[in-house]
């Protein structure tokens, strides 16, 4: 697995033993961002990823560390197995979710967008593609395609043979390739399209809005049954523009979310909506509006800490 920059995440670390930072704690802290990203890409939830990290720390603290040859690989194995268990539970809960389910937005550092592969892997569009994989397929895809683990390491993490993992990886790659965004989009192209979109929404300029929306654009709104949101996808530039026209004059603030530029709506000082986009050929083909307060609480805390 290559060492690479990870999305900016919370800074809370594991508890120390009587204030002493031992080698086990140092190893966990050193790989914390990596472990968080693995868990987040498997679960699509920052809050659940944090819970998995706490569970991983508790199990890591009980390990005979003198017998561990590769601390990073061992930690990845623990976090993967914990995330797989949680993912299977979350899958059952999502079957009864009210309206479209969207991943929990993650505030990321601007420089994450410069790592195109990493930014793509945590984008809303890609996380929704990963939702269509079976839990083990998702784990194998993330560990192999995003973090470059070899098949033996992945086999140990998911409890399968290397041969079985190769087959799963091939199946997962084909599945993702058929559904992933059409091509890489530069940060500048995303920023330009988002700025045009922001101006159109804030001014209520319907024609300008139609100019930046693809004819087959899809709007997904996640209110979780708590906030007002469409209970089904809104499809087509005209229909999407009419929905967005209802929020004209609302101030939209730029931010970096899931590795890409996005927009945030604040009401009374608190995050009300996070709007992420998918861009293809210079036009917006996907709009993802997260309004469920439970999915915004982690970002609210991270925004408070960093800004």
Image: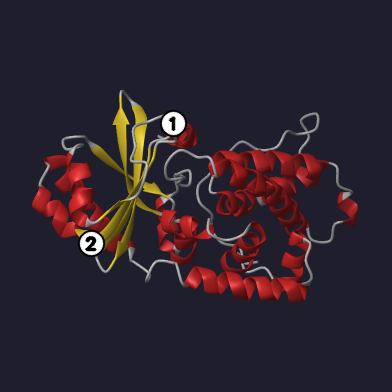
* Residue 23 horizontal side relative to residue 221, left or right: right
108 or 222: nearer the viewer:
222
Query: Which residue lies under the disc numbered 1?
Result: 293
Secondary structure of the residue carrying tag 1 is helix
Q: Is residue 176 above or below residue 85?
A: below
Q: Quadrant of the N terminus?
A: bottom right
Vertical placement of 19 versus 170: above or below?
Answer: above
- Counting from the top left corner in percent of width and height, residue 40 is at 57, 49
Which of marks 1 and 2 precedes in the sequence?
Answer: 2
Whether residue 205 is visible, yes or no, is yes
In the image, what residue occupies the spot 56% across and 38% down? 47
Identify the image quadrant of the C terminus. Answer: top left
Which mark is drawn over residue 214?
A: 2
Q: Position of residue 197 (x, y in %)?
A: 21, 51
* Res 22 seen here: no
Q: Residue at x 65, y 38 (%)?
A: 51
- Please state the horizontal and vertical placement of residue 31, each as a whole percent of the image: 66, 52
Q: Secondary structure at mark 2?
A: strand
Assess disc 1: are there few (<14), some (14-19) or many (≥20) residues with their C-alpha within 10 Å of its C-alpha: some
Q: Is residue 123 left or right of residue 185?
A: right
Q: Decide if residue 8 is on the left or right side of residue 256.
A: right
Q: Residue at x 61, y 44 (%)?
A: 92
Count of marks, rendered view: 2
Q: Quadrant of residue 69?
A: bottom right
Q: Are marks 2 and 1 in contact (CB under 8 Å)?
A: no
Residue 167: percent from left, percent from top: 68, 75
Q: Quadrant of residue 107?
A: top left
Which of the pair 218/264 is nearer the observer? 218
Mark 2–mark 1 Cα distance, whole angstroms, equals 29 Å
Q: Is residue 225 above or below residue 230?
A: above
């Amino acid at each position: 697995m290559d060492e690479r920059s990870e999305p900016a995440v919370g800074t809370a670390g594991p508890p120390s033993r009587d204030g002493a930072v031992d080698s086990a704690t140092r190893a966990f802290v050193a790989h914390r961002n990596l472990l968080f990203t693995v868990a987040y890409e498997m679960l699509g939830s920052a809050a659940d990823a944090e819970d998995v990290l706490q569970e991983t720390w508790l199990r890591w603290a009980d390990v005979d560390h003198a017998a561990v040859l590769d601390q990073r690989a061992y930690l990845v194995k623990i976090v993967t197995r914990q995330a797989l268990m949680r993912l299977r539970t979350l899958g059952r809960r999502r079957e009864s979710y009210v309206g479209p389910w969207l991943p929990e937005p993650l505030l990321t550092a601007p420089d994450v967008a410069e790592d195109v592969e990493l930014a793509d892997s945590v984008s809303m569009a890609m996380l929704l593609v990963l939702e269509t994989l079976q839990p083990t397929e998702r784990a194998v895809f993330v560990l192999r395609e995003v973090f470059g683990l070899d098949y033996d390491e992945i086999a140990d993490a998911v409890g399968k043979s290397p041969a079985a993992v190769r087959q799963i990886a091939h199946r997962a790659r084909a599945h993702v390739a058929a559904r992933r965004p059409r091509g890489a989009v530069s940060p500048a192209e995303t920023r330009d399209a988002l700025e045009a979109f922001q101006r159109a929404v804030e001014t209520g300029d319907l024609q300008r809005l139609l100019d930046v929306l693809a004819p087959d654009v899809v709007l997904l709104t996640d209110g979780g049954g708590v906030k007002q949101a469409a209970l089904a996808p809104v499809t087509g530039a005209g229909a999407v523009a009419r929905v967005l026209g209802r929020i004209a004059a609302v101030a939209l603030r730029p931010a970096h979310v899931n590795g890409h530029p996005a927009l945030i709506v604040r009401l009374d000082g608190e995050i009300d909506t996070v709007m992420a986009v998918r861009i293809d050929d210079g036009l917006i083909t996907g709009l993802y509006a997260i309004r469920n307060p439970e999915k915004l609480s982690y970002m609210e805390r991270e925004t408070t800490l960093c800004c």
